[in-house]
């Protein structure tokens, strides 16, 4: 059950709503409630429900179940859902060695330890594997997270990969469609950005975001990835943001994904 001061789901509190005396809160799907209150995107919320991590009044929730956040106690991993915080949108320059997850059963470092000063609990949008670094968006707005992550929105993600091997010779092959884990993928663009001893620096733009896709594409073309850094998502660029630091997105940056 949420604190009475929280009001109902939406941008206004119950007391602020002009029809407050006549309006009764309608039950919502539990997945939507989790999204609105910043616990996860709807897609991730469904996964959490399927995994048995969500309860309503002490009973495990099921897909499609509805609840009233004012009268029902909704909990994730045993912790009651908190009042909706003001939407927060941040860009983190993720260092290598940090997991893009909210928790790790093995006690490894996660990106959550880097954003403790954000003012509210935020969640990663998409993933960067532990050995990769660079631009990672985090938010408590589940709908924003889904809009950014969904491939149908065609937000190009640009990476810089330092590779060992014939980088220049691999560019044509890297630019062609290839099958990765049973799926046909294709980079939007691949260019040689520089030379390093024993290899080169590639700049690779992709729309898809399949698991370790760029590393696997490089491997198919005879290249070994030494470092991998995401430098932009759509118009958002990492710029001069230092490793391990974060900043708030501007209103214009948020609106681009809205």
Image (tube, rainbow, N blue to C red):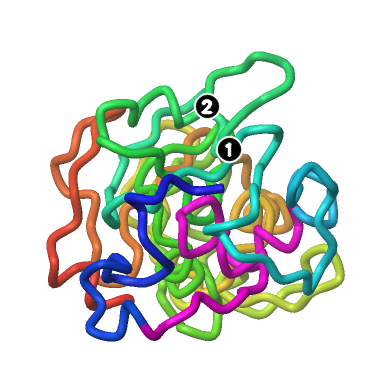
Tell me where residue 48 appears, x and y as whole percent: 74, 52
Residue placed farthest to the top in the image?
Answer: 107
Q: Which mark is residue 110?
A: 2
Residue tagged 1: 101
- Give residue 237's quadrant in the image: bottom left
- Asked if the residues shown at circle 2 and circle 1 are in contact, with their CB atoms under 8 angstroms apart, the answer is yes
| Disc on the earlier residue, 2 or 1 | 1
Q: Nearer the viewer, residue 55 or 179?
A: 55
Residue placed farthest to the front in the image?
Answer: 21
Please report the residue visible at 28 percent of the width from the left and 48 percent of the height from the top. 91
Please report the residue visible at 61 percent of the width from the left and 74 percent of the height from the top. 28
Inspect the magenta stretch and tell me whether residue 44 lies in it. yes
Please, is residue 224 above or below residue 114 in the view? below
Tell me where residue 117 appears, x and y as whole percent: 25, 27
Part of the protein shown in magenta: 22-48
Question: Can residue 63 be seen by looking at this rendering?
Answer: yes
Element under label 1?
loop
């Amino acid at each position: 059950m949420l604190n009475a001061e929280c009001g109902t789901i939406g941008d206004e509190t119950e007391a602020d709503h002009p029809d407050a005396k006549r309006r009764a809160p309608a039950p919502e799907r539990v997945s939507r409630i989790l999204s609105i209150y910043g616990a996860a995107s709807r897609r991730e919320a469904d996964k959490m429900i399927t995994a048995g991590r969500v309860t309503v009044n002490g009973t495990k929730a099921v897909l499609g179940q509805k609840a009233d956040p004012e009268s029902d106690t909704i909990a994730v991993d045993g912790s009651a859902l908190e009042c909706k915080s003001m939407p927060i949108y941040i860009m983190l320059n993720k260092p290598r060695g940090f997991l893009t997850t909210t928790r790790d059963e093995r006690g490894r470092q996660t990106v959550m330890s880097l954003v403790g000063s954000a003012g509210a609990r935020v969640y990663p949008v998409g993933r960067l594997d532990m050995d990769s670094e660079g631009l990672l968006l985090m938010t408590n707005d589940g709908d924003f997270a889904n809009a950014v992550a969904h491939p149908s929105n065609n937000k190009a993600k640009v990476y810089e990969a330092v590779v060992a091997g014939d980088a220049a010779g691999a560019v044509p092959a890297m630019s062609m469609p290839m099958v990765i884990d049973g799926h046909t993928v294709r980079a939007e663009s691949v260019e040689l950005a520089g030379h390093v001893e024993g290899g080169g620096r590639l700049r690779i733009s992709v729309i898809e975001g399949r698991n370790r896709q760029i590393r696997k594409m490089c491997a198919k073309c005879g290249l070994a990835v030494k470092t991998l850094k995401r430098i932009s998502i759509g118009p958002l660029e990492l710029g001069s943001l230092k490793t391990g630091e974060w900043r708030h997105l501007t209103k214009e940056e948020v609106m681009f994904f809205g």
